[in-house]
Image: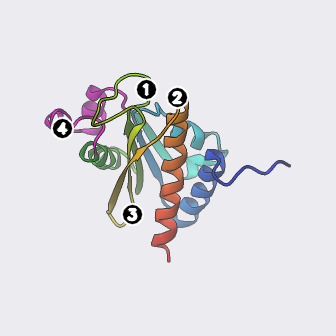
Amino acid sequence: MNQLPLNDPIHLAARLGELLQTRGWRLVTAESCTGGWVAKIITDIAGSSLWFDRGFVTYSNAAKQDMLGVNSALIAAQGAVSEAVVQAMVRGALAHSLAEIAIAISGIAGPNGGSISKPVGTVWIGWSLPNGSIHSRCFQFTGDREAVRYQAVTTALHELLMLLEMQSK
C-alpha cells in the first residue's frame, strides 16, 4: 500500500478526524476562496459523518452575510479577505452548526483580484477550539490559482491539527 505524504490533505484530514472522533467533537467549515475543498477532502473519508457536521461555501459577500451572519459594515470596512471577517466567519459557522471546532478561509486565489495591500495569494484562515478561543493567521501563498487554493486547504488542516495537539498537552 502506498503511504501518503504527511502533508497530504487527505492524510491530514484523516488524522484530524481520528483526533476529533476520540474527543467527541465535530467540525464545521466556512470556505470562500477554497470553494468547499476542505469539506470535500473531509467527506472523501469514510465515516467522516461521525465528526464532520457541515460546510458552508460562502464565496460571495452576500453569502457570508446570509449564511454566517457576517456584518456587511465589517466587510465594507475591512474587506472580505481580513482577520476580522475570517473570525466573524468562524463565529457564524459555529452559531449555525452543531460543531465545537471550526475552520474558516477567505483569500485571493487569483489570477486577478489582488491589490498592493492584498496581493494574489493572500489568504486569511481562522480556527476555533472547544475552549472558545479563535485563532487566525494571514498567509501569502505562491503559484497559480490551483496552487494557492491547495496550499490554503492543506495549511488549514495542518494548523488545526497543530492547535488541537498543543491544546491537549
Three-letter code, disc 3: Pro
Mark 3 or mark 1, which has the lower sequence index? 1
Counting from the top left corner in percent of width and height, residue 70 is at 23, 39
The residue sitting at 48% across, 57% down in the picture is: 160
Q: For the residue labelled by badge 1, is the local secondary structure a helix, a strand or a loop?
A: loop
Numbered tag placed on residue 71 in the rendering = 4
Q: Dot 3: within a 10 Å radius of its alpha carbon, few (fewer than 14), some, or many (20 or more) residues?
A: some
Q: Nearer the viewer, mark 1 or mark 4?
A: 1
Which residue ends up furthest to the right in the rendered image? Answer: 1
Q: Is the Cβ of the residue at disc 4 closer than 8 Å to that at disc 3?
A: no
Q: Nearer the viewer, mark 2 or mark 4?
A: 2
Counting from the top left corner in percent of width and height, residue 123 is at 39, 41
Mark 2 or mark 3, which has the lower sequence index? 3
Please determine whether, in this image, residue 155 is positioned above or below residue 41: below
Magenta stretch: includes residue 81: yes
Numbered tag placed on residue 110 in the rendering = 1
- Is residue 154 toward the left or the right of residue 56 in the image? right
Three-letter code, disc 4: Asn
Numbered tag placed on residue 58 in the rendering = none
Three-letter code, disc 1: Gly
Q: Nearer the viewer, residue 30 or 86?
A: 86
Q: Is the Cβ of the residue at disc 2 closer than 8 Å to that at disc 1?
A: yes
Q: For the residue labelled by badge 2, is the local secondary structure a helix, a strand or a loop?
A: loop
